[in-house]
Amino acid sequence: MNFSRMIFALTASLVCGTATASPESDFWKWFQKNETALFNFESNEKTIFEQLEVQMHKVNSTLTFEFGPKEQGQRDFVISADGILDSFPSVEKLYAAAPQLKKWKFIKFRPRREPSDIKFRGILVPASSVAVLIERDGPKAALTVLIPGYTKAEHESYAGIAFLMLDRALGEFDVETRVGFIEVSAPSDQYARARPLKSLPEAFDAFLSHE
């Protein structure tokens, strides 16, 4: 190979390398380089979380994350769009580019979890006190969240609590893609037809399986 051809080959290699780079692959390269610190983030949580946020925002400024506890030498890492539907494709792309790492289980979107008590803006709502009425909203489900103590004067706070509870019970993906209208109310005669929050996932899936 003569000198000019060598220069061309090197240039083509660099151009191809640049072309195949992506924000997603750059993120996972950084993740792997900092894997030990991320896995043990509790030792320097503030700094690690700030650095991780910066790297995720290079992919999409709305993306966020969650860590699970250490279990048998492994840890969950959740990639979330923070409930923003327009950012779901970014979650999908970042998840699809994730490497196989023994210490990690990568999860796209906040998953379903056991209901828990929620305290928001000074209001504490026990999960066991909440019931949800499921009705039809076209191809989706309309949900009325019945919360004891609800008042119209504090609607915004109770609406926030309702969303947090639904997000936890049904998971981020279903709340944003399979739920239509959401209403918050104090318990009334509707309460007898509503489902306890704990049994909502099963009832929700069964409801949408019937057209």
Image: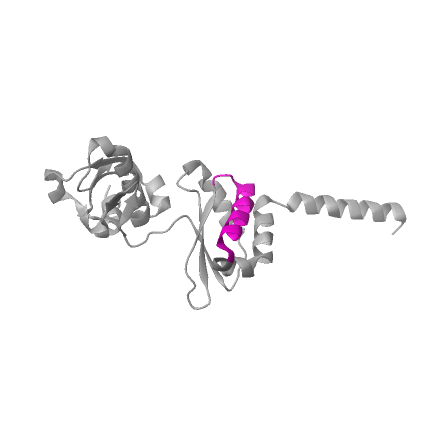
Task: List the single residue furthest toward the bottom.
Answer: 72
The answer to whether 138 is drawn above or below residue 74 in the figure is above
Instruction: Measuring from the top left, give residue 46's x and y in whole percent.
Output: 49, 51
Quadrant of the image occupied by residue 19: top right
What residue lies at 84% left-to-right and 46% top-to-bottom?
7
Is residue 139 in view from this perspective?
no
In this picture the colour scheme is one colour
What residue lies at 50% left-to-right and 63% top-to-bottom?
103
* Residue 155 highlighted magenta (yes or no): no
Task: List the single residue furthest toward the front.
Answer: 122
In which quadrant will I find the C terminus? Answer: top left
The answer to whether 119 is drawn above or below residue 32 in the figure is above
Q: 83 or 20: nearer the eye? A: 83
Is residue 167 in view from this perspective?
yes
What residue lies at 22% left-to-right and 31% top-to-bottom?
153
Instruction: Measuring from the top left, give residue 63's x and y in whole percent.
Output: 47, 43
Horizontal side of 53 relative to 127 (left or right) equals right
Horizontal side of 92 relative to 179 (left or right) equals right
Task: List the single residue furthest toward the right.
Answer: 2
Instruction: Measuring from the top left, give residue 180's x and y in whole percent.
Output: 29, 36
What residue range appears in magenta?
44-62
Task: List the single residue furthest toward the top.
Answer: 153
* Residue 53 highlighted magenta (yes or no): yes
Q: Main secondary structure of the magenta part?
A: helix
Instruction: Measuring from the top left, give residue 61's x and y in whole percent.
Output: 51, 39
- Count up the numbered dots: 0
Q: 108 or 165: nearer the eye? A: 165
Q: 149 or 189: nearer the eye? A: 149
